[in-house]
Amino acid sequence: MTAPRFVPIPPEAAAAPRVNGHARVAYPPPPAPHAAAVPVDYAVVRQLQARVTETLTRILADSANVTAAHRRETAARIGREVMADYVVAMAHAGQPVSPATEQALLDAVVAGMFGAGRLQRLLDDPKVTNVHIIGCDQVLLHHADGSRSRGEPVADSDDELIGMLQVLAMRVAATERQLSESNPELDMQLPDGSRMTVLYKVSPRPVVYIRKHSLFTATLEELRDRWGMIDLLLYRFLTKALDAGANIMIAGLAASGKTTLLRALARTIPAGEPYITLEESRELGLHETVHPGDENWVISLESLQGHGEYDANGKRRGEKTLHDMMPITQRLGVRRVIVGETRGREIVPMLRAMTVSRGAMCTIHSRQAREVMDSIVQLACSYGNDIGAEQALRMAAQGIDLIVYTSVVDERAIGGGEHRFVSHVIEVGGMRDGRVVTTTVFGPGADGRAVPRHLPERIRDDLMDVGYDPRELIAYIEAGPHNRGSWTRELHTKRVRS
């Protein structure tokens, strides 16, 4: 049975009891156990895992240079043996264990040792898109159809949850991460590519948010043909702009598809061309090959958290930020630098890199397309007293060629769907009379999706050099109110948009 859709303010909210000033919302309970979700006794899992760990440690004690694959394979074999002994013992005790329960227990043991522990089930469930966790037992699941439901507890206590997250941070993260009283925040990539953010000590109970990337491997062609994020005109323009070496900034609200579009665009870069990715915590995954045997020359750099005492500059020993690493990228002999997300002081070295490089890309949060420059200035002014608003604007006007704005229309609360699409492509043309000159090459059409509006000027010659003639947009521009671009599917929304 499909869970009822979540409605933020239910009709009966006025009369409903309130908790902390909020009306109670009756979330659907966790789904009843079935063949694909067998109940697991985690007290038994802990006992079995302890036996497997003890045996594994003894067997590998004298082995040198043990690979992770060999360790996991050995643990899986030991786990099957330990599980077989447990099943026999339970049968003798008159409590037979079903094959489904046996497999669920074994999966939980392996997940605890090599995966994400009790979070692994949520990562493996394709119907779950995002997860909010407050404490060990408040679990809110966001589903692909827009509904929400309560999930099973992910630990028996808050302390157990923190312990699991601390082990996960040390074992799974590509670079060492720490969750402690001195480091109460954690941002890291999970084994399946999902992004996990944790808050500890600064809130009454531990807070965990897991964002799953459902379109992690989506290509630009799939965003065009399957997901309707761009049309053929945008596809041709953006790929040719990237070929021409245009510096592209992708802007939009959170969860509007910025990272998905950036990742798909980056995958159109020729496989033999080295380039650099810079991220606070890896989530682009561009350094990983999609198919075995593929060539990949991506240099993936990730910030380091740092530990110990603070130095005179307010940094921990060993800490490396995106701001610290940006200068070295100009000495690695690559043309392109891609920053997964600019949300702080790294915006200044990013803009500086754009002024001396070609084909760079990054993302930035902004509420509206016309506010992107304001967002850049706000971040740049946090760099320090030596960067003012006017200088930040000049750097942006000099370094950025195109701003691509992604919009999201979320009508799930009123029974509609969730739509993500490109609504603007804005060319940045330098400064004139103290103002940034821009040209809206693509702007919102009747339904909000981007359609051709004006011909590009700054990058026109560069586009011609790579075989793209912007004049193919003229017929659409001259269509006026009948301009629908080349979108092949209607955008079905509840609200009427003028």
Image (cartoon, rainbow, N blue to C red):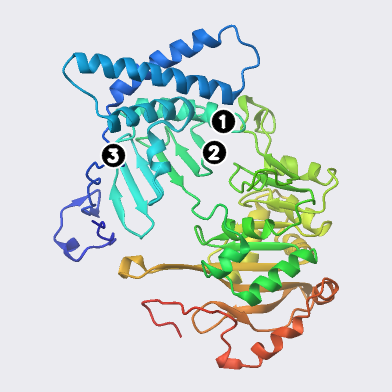
Residue to which mark 3 is pinned: 152
Give percent across and percent down for residue 413: 32, 66
Residue in the foreground of this view, choosing between 165 and 29: 29
Residue to which mark 2 is pinned: 188
Q: Is residue 180 visible?
A: no
Q: Give, as a three-letter code, the residue at label 1.
A: Arg
Tell me which numbered mark, 2 or 3, is placed earlier along the sequence.
3
Q: Do the residues under discs 2 and 1 have CB atoms within 8 angstroms? A: yes
Q: Residue at x 54, y 31 (%)?
A: 172
Tell me which numbered mark, 2 or 1, is placed earlier along the sequence.
1
Q: Residue at x 36, y 41 (%)?
A: 133
Tell me which numbered mark, 3 or 1, is placed earlier along the sequence.
3
Report helix, strand or loop for mark 1: loop
Q: Residue at x 45, y 15 (%)?
A: 53
Query: Label 1 crowding class (10 Å Cα cut-off): few <14, some 14-19, many 20+?
Result: many
Query: Label 3 crowding class (10 Å Cα cut-off): few <14, some 14-19, many 20+?
Result: some
Report helix, strand or loop for mark 3: loop
Marks 2 and 3 sit apart, C-alpha to C-alpha, by 23 Å
Q: Quadrant of residue 433?
A: bottom right
Residue in the foreground of this view, choosing between 113 and 22: 113
Residue to which mark 1 is pinned: 177
Which quadrant of the rendered structure holds the N terminus? bottom left
Q: Which mark is residue 83?
A: none
Marks 3 and 1 sit apart, C-alpha to C-alpha, by 27 Å
User: From what the image shows, is residue 135 above or below residue 410?
Assistant: above
Q: Give, as a three-letter code, the residue at label 3.
A: Glu
Q: Is 253 on the left or on the right of 47, as rendered? A: right
Give percent across and percent down for residue 218: 57, 57
Q: Do the residues under discs 2 and 3 have CB atoms within 8 angstroms? A: no
User: From what the image shows, is residue 54 above or below residue 382?
Assistant: above
